[in-house]
Amino acid sequence: MQMKFKLTAVAALTAFAGMAFAQDMVVKIGHVGPTSGGIAHLGKGNENGAKMAIEDLNAKGVTIGGKKVKLELAAEDDGADPKQGTSVAQKLVDMKVAGVIGHLNSGTSIPASKIYSDAGIPQISPSATNPKFTRNGYKTTFRVVADDVHLGGTLGRYAVKNLKGKAIAVIDDRTAYGQGVADEFEKAVKAAGGKIVGREFTNDKATDFMPILTTLKGKKPDVVFFGGMDAVAGPMMRQMKNLGVTAKFMGGDGICSSELPKLAGDAMADGQVVCAEAGGVEGTQKAGMDKFYADYKKRFNIDVTVYEPYVYDALNVMVAAMVKAGSAEPAKYLPVLAATKDYKGVTGTISFDPKGDVLNGALTLYTYKGGKRDQIAVVR
């Protein structure tokens, strides 16, 4: 009799627990980045940032409209390819996700943004910096980093005024990001009175840069700017060294990763590289970012590459808007998301302007010493 009672009690408790779980509202949030291909290390890092945000929010407990919510991540790979990017965007729309964090690249984020806009699903990119991303008039499009006008412009001025560049060469990978940031860099160099001695281009899957580097070597550049990603920048630096080109090497956030020293090998001299991350914190806010870096290392046993804290903040900003709106329905929480003001994130304070751009976005200038990133300054 006692055994039967125990079994009945256990069954009742199990049924109650199952019923309690069933009452939890599941909210799916999409994440898209290139988890295959040459910059898969960046895409996987972004996905890890999203996973960490989901895990932390679920651990704290999220209530939306009086209902306890279980957040789930729907992660997709776009291979940094615009065609694949639109395909997975449609897949997430069909899954009826509540929102999307991504894509990583401007070249995939821009075409995907129309699909999300047509479906009314909010999209926050943690890393797409091409100005066009937020210039199409879509009400669903946001980003938590500064754009290429700010990033390329700052680097261009720095090349002339701080590095005293007399002969500056520019290379880009012809992607929306690479060409865009290179164009802004070139404009700023010229505006600051600098001289562009050559402009060459490659592609984001190239491995042989000898022809364009040989052409540029003849122009004796003291600064070479590359608009593209670290997977191309590293081998390019190796080939520069083989040719005896000792110019300073500059780039945007695409090259400004913890992986660049490994990709460049012994071709990277201390202080040779100057790059900018499209974000940054200083003063008292630095403690929060440092904690994130430590927590991330503990959770995944790898270092932050570049964008993980921005992914983390983007997802938290999205969920905070759902909580404030009392709904995870895109149409209901979208106006609240657009009105985000002074959200305290690990990457700083986040507010959106009417286009969906982050207000007063910061940049952090870095160099590398002893194979590690070394901060130069935070610029606004």
Image: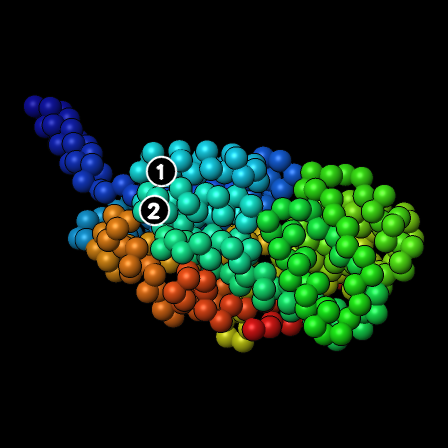
Q: In this view, does 14 lie to the left or right of 79?
A: left
Q: Examine the rendered structure and indicate whether residue 308 appears above or below residue 280.
A: above
* CB under 8 Å between discs 2 and 1: yes
Q: What element carries label 2?
A: loop
Question: Local crowd at mark 1 within 10 Å, few (<14), some, or many (≥20)?
Answer: some
Q: Examine the rendered structure and indicate whether residue 134 appears above or below residue 52.
A: below
Looking at the picture, how far across and down is residue 335, in whole percent? 29, 59
In-front residue for pair 268/113: 113
Q: Which residue is drawn at the image coordinates 34% and 61% (left, top)?
A: 338
What residue sits right under mark 1 in the picture? 93
Q: Is residue 277 left or right of residue 15?
A: right
Quadrant (top left/top right/bottom left/bottom right) for the N terminus? top left
What residue sits right under mark 2 in the picture? 121
Looking at the picture, how far across and down is residue 217, in whole percent? 89, 54
Of the residues under marks 2 and 1, which one precedes in the sequence? Answer: 1
Q: What element carries label 1?
A: helix
Q: Is residue 265 visible?
A: no
Q: Is residue 231 left or right of residue 63?
A: right
